[in-house]
Every structure is written in C-alpha cells, then in structure tokens.
Amino acid sequence: MKSIIRVFLICIAAQLLLVNPVSALELKIRDEYLLDARGDDGDIYLNRIELNKKIDSPDMRISAFVDSQWNSEIDDWERVLLGLEAGKDLWQYLYIGQSFQLISGQVLDHMVFATDSKSFDTITKIVLRLPFWDRFSFDVFEEYSLNLEEGRDEYNEVGAEIAYRPKKLYSIAVGWRHTDRIHTFDTDYASFSLSLHF
C-alpha cells in the first residue's frame, strides 16, 4: 500500500511540474483506479500524461504520451508505455486512433511468445461517445494491441463509462473495463477516473 501511495504522490508532483502553458498544445492528465472485480489480478492504478496537437488539415490529433500502470497485487509496474498516437474524430461521436509505442513491464510476462523486457507494439483504439443530459456522456471503447516484433496480438481491452464534464478543465467518470490478455487470463474491473485538461 505504501508503494501505491508513493507512486500516486510522484505522479501528482510530476503533473504539477508539467502544468505550464505550451503554445498550441493541449495537456491532458488522466488518473484512474481499477478495482479488480474477480479478485484474481489485483487493483491497478493508471496514469496517462499526453500532449495533444490538433492539425486542421486533414483534421487529426497527434499525441505524445506516457502511460503507466501499477499493479497492487505484484507491487510493481504492470505496463509502461511511451509513444505517439494519431487519431481522428468521425462525425461528432466516434473517435478512431492508432498508436505506436515502446512497452515494458510485467504485462510482457503474460505473452505466449518470448519478448525482452522491452518491446514495440501498436494499439488500435475506437471510442464511441454518446452525450446525454447536459454535461454527461456514455462512452464505450475498445483497444486492440499487436506486438510489432512478433507480429502477434498481445491484449484486448473493452470498457464503458459514464463521464461527467462540468467544465472544460476536468471530468470524472465511473465504469467497467474487461482486459483480455488473449493467451492467458482475463480480468474485469470497476473503474474510477479523474481527467484534467489544460
């Protein structure tokens, strides 16, 4: 438990240091806690820090990000990603993104194929956002990961959440997430998140 608190404090400190106005860039920080519903994998703390740049033509978003995932059961980093994502909003409700990243952490131990302690993969992301009432939305997403070195699938995540966005600066959400490690065990989580936008 002390390790989780330390990681949480380090992430908060890093966020405070990074919150500076950057010309034409948007900073987004998302902290999420995943409560293991099955009790077979452990609770997870997720932190994602990304810098976004909107490109008017051809109307796309480019993001550089760091995504870290701490597992309370193993008391270690389950997954750390450093990468780039290109995405496009289609119509008003659908987002499709493709990312390329360096991946490390215990998640690589669950693969049926052998990898080093670091590897390269790509994630295809689809998000459907359905607004309702005034500041609420129902979001459904799927992420599919493919290991580039082995040419094989790594994991698949699907989820849904209800998000409340009272201001442009922040949003909070509760939801459910299912992680399919494809070649090993699956896990279901209840999720609670806070996102900050600068």
Image: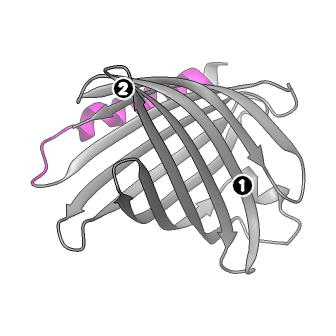
Give the vertical position of 119 relative to 137 (above or below): below
Residue beneath the point at 35% across and 55% down: 91
Q: Which residue is mark 2?
A: 171
Asked if 76 appears above or below 180 in the picture, the reply is above
Q: Residue at x 69, y 39 (%)?
A: 76
Asked whether 12 falls inside the magenta stretch, the response is: yes
Q: Is residue 117 above or below residue 179?
A: below
Q: Is residue 140 visible?
A: yes
**Quick one: quadrant of the N terminus?**
top right
Which badge, 2 or 1, is on the more N-terminal residue? 1
Residue most toward the left? 23
Out of 87 and 150, give the one closest to the viewer: 87
Q: Based on the displayed image, in which of its 4 quarters is residue 167 positioned?
A: top left
**Residue 166: image x %, image y %?**
28, 19
Say which element carries label 2: strand
Q: How is the image coloured?
A: one colour
Q: What number of labels is visible?
A: 2
Inspect the image, locate mark 1, and give the three-letter code of the amino acid beneath it.
Answer: Asn
In the image, residue 125 above or below residue 70: below
Q: Quadrant of the C terminus?
A: top left
Q: Is residue 47 left or right of residue 26?
A: right
Which sits in the foreground, 17 or 25?
A: 25
Mark 1, secondary structure of its residue: strand
Label 2: how many residues lie within 10 Å, few (<14), some (14-19) or many (20+)?
some
Q: Residue at x 65, y 70 (%)?
A: 119
Using residue 165 as the reference point, say whether residue 118 is left or right of it. right
Residue under numbered circle 1: 156
What stretch of residues is rendered in magenta? Answer: 4-23
Left or right of residue 156: residue 89: left
User: Is residue 13 in the magenta section?
Assistant: yes
The 10 Å Cα crowd at callout 1, few under 14, some 14 to 19, many 20 or more, is some
Label annotation for residue 47 = none
